[in-house]
Image (cartoon, rainbow, N blue to C red):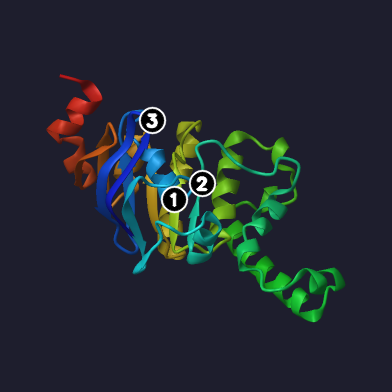
Amino acid sequence: MSTTDLSLSFGGVHAVRDVTFEVDEGEVYSIIGPNGAGKTSIFNLISRLYEADSGNIEFQGEIISNLPPHNIARLGIARTFQNTELFEHETVLKNMLIGRHVHRKTILLSELLFLPGVAKQELRFRQVVEDVIDLLDLQSYRDQVIGSLPYGVRKMVEVARALCIQPKLLLLDEPSSGLNPEETEDVAFWIEDINQDFGATIIMVEHDMNLVTRVSNRVMALADGAVLAVGSPEEIQNHPEVLRAYLGD
């Protein structure tokens, strides 16, 4: 996935300024920066929640900058949000099955009659969901209602629902936000598992530099919507422009 001269403004405020970057297949690529740097805005542009003022986004050789948002998941791009966006009154299992909806091949009438093709599709969907449940160790929560779960588990369920799309590219927006150190340690493990076992390329927006350093192949630092530097976690942590953006002169 790559972007070229991507820009976005809200009135006179430049949220994203001519951002160009490329993520290699199979990479864990992190985006860091102070609050208001434009990190989540980039995610919203990739997932087509926002319309770019200029620039292009390319995914697997296709320009996706002008696609409608509902086509993005079908291409194999899934995302999570800073605050969980789950169906509070449904179970973990049902929330995860919703993630398979994009792969639905049947029509409403056949589903109402529950024809054999619908039953086979349901079994295939269930197998994918079970694999994700095993990966993220959610067996004990599968039949619990989302509203009754602690925040850390909800964060995992949102990631699980995104994985049920079987994404080629997974966008993680501050996965450790609101979590304690033990839960953040778990996040590091499942990011590694998602990347290695599911083969998903990951772009992560994150403030916790310990997590970023542990799981990332490369890091892009932003400030005021513009790219400051791109490099290994160690290079970014010692980059003078990045230090100035975080700590001031």
For disc 3, the marked residue is 11
Left or right: 212 as drawn, with respect to 115:
left
Q: Secondary structure at mark 3?
A: loop
Between 43 and 160, the one lying in front of the other is: 43
**Residue shown at 79% from the left, 80% from the top:** 116
Q: Measuring from the top left, give residue 235's x and y in whole percent.
A: 17, 42
Determine the secondary structure under disc 1: strand
In this view, the mark in front (3 or 1): 3
Q: Of label 3 and label 1, which has the lower sequence position? A: 3
Q: Is residue 165 above or below residue 44?
A: below
Q: Residue at x 22, y 27 (%)?
A: 245
For discs 3 and 2, the disc positioned in front in the rendered view: 3
On the question of residue 34 being in view, the answer is: yes
The secondary element bearing badge 2 is classed as loop
Q: Establish if 246 lies above or below 24.
A: above
What's the amino acid at mark 1? Answer: Leu
Disc 1 to disc 2, how far (Cα)? Answer: 6 Å
Q: Which residue is mark 1?
A: 171
Residue that badge 2 annotates: 80
Q: Residues within 10 Å of mark 3 (few under 14, many from 20)?
A: few
Question: Which numbered tag is attached to residue 181?
Answer: none
Residue appearing at x 68%, y 38% in the figure: 149
- Kind of residue at badge 3: Gly
Asked if marks 1 and 2 touch (Cβ < 8 Å), the reply is: yes
